[in-house]
Image (cartoon, rainbow, N blue to C red):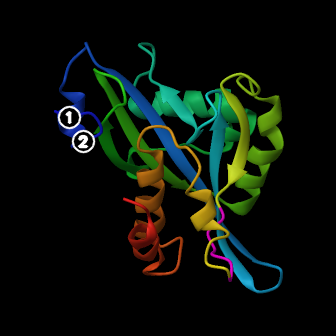
Amino acid sequence: MALGSKVELAEALALGPGWRHACHALLYAPDPRLLFGRFPLRYAVLMQMRFDGRLGFPGGFVDAQDRSLEDGLNRELREELGEAAAAFRVERADYRGSRLGPRPRVLAHFYAKRLAPEQLEALEAGAPRAKDHGLEVLGLVRVPLYTLQDGAGGLPAFLENSFIGAAREQLLEALEDLELVEPGSVSRLKARAPQ
């Protein structure tokens, strides 16, 4: 199996005790506002600036005491985002996929959870008081889901940042699959991307 390749969840869970599992979540909420009165925001999607200067999703490694992948993910969300993360729970129904991780014998599991706008705003407000803020997590950022009139500002410019592992691909797949952006916009972005 090649690093970064997709793996079915049942196959990932059957690999045995020599493997570590990391779980991360895309958290999003509806946002009906307009930027400058004309660019629809549509949704607020959270990512975080990591300790290594790359963008990623909140989450981390599942520990031996965690009863499930989701228990480990929810524990990590509380550590990285603060107590506001206790107001919701990421469940197996929010699971989106698994990949072989960036290091050998690591499996990366990805989830997407829709929140109420108030829940997402509470996460943003409370994150600076979280256990891992300023250590593993340097701050939260919202993904701009629009493209400015110049064709480069907004999401196209955001995608030029450095992302950890498969986070960029996971973001684009989730934006398209969950219909968080206009239909066809992700395909246009991929077609413009340098190969």
Category of crowding for the residue at label 2, using alpha-carbon neighbours closer than 10 angstroms: few (below 14), some (14–19), many (at least 20): few
Badge number at residue 57: none
Quadrant location of the N terminus in the rendered image: top left
Residue type at the position of mark 1:
Ala
Determine the residue positioned at 25% across, 13% down.
Answer: 18
Q: Nearer the viewer, residue 83 or 3?
A: 3
Crowdedness of circle 1 by 10 Å Cα count: few (<14), some, many (20+)? Answer: few
Residue 60, position as x, y percentages in the image: 51, 28
Q: Is residue 7 left or right of residue 126?
A: left
- Tell me residue 32's x, y (percent): 72, 77
| Dominant secondary structure of the residues highlighted in magenta in the image | loop
Q: Which residue is found at the position 82% from the left and 34% from the top?
A: 128
Span highlighted in magenta in the image: 144-149
Indicate the quadrant containing the C terminus: top left, top right, bottom left or bottom right.
Answer: bottom left
Q: Which residue is mark 1?
A: 2
In this rendering, the answer to whether 158 lies above or below 72 is: below
Q: Residue at position x 33%, y 47% from top? A: 97
Give x and y (percent) for residue 15. 19, 24
Q: Position of residue 192 (x, y in %)?
A: 44, 71
Q: Is residue 147 magenta?
A: yes
Splitting the image into 4 quarters, where does residue 55 fall? top right
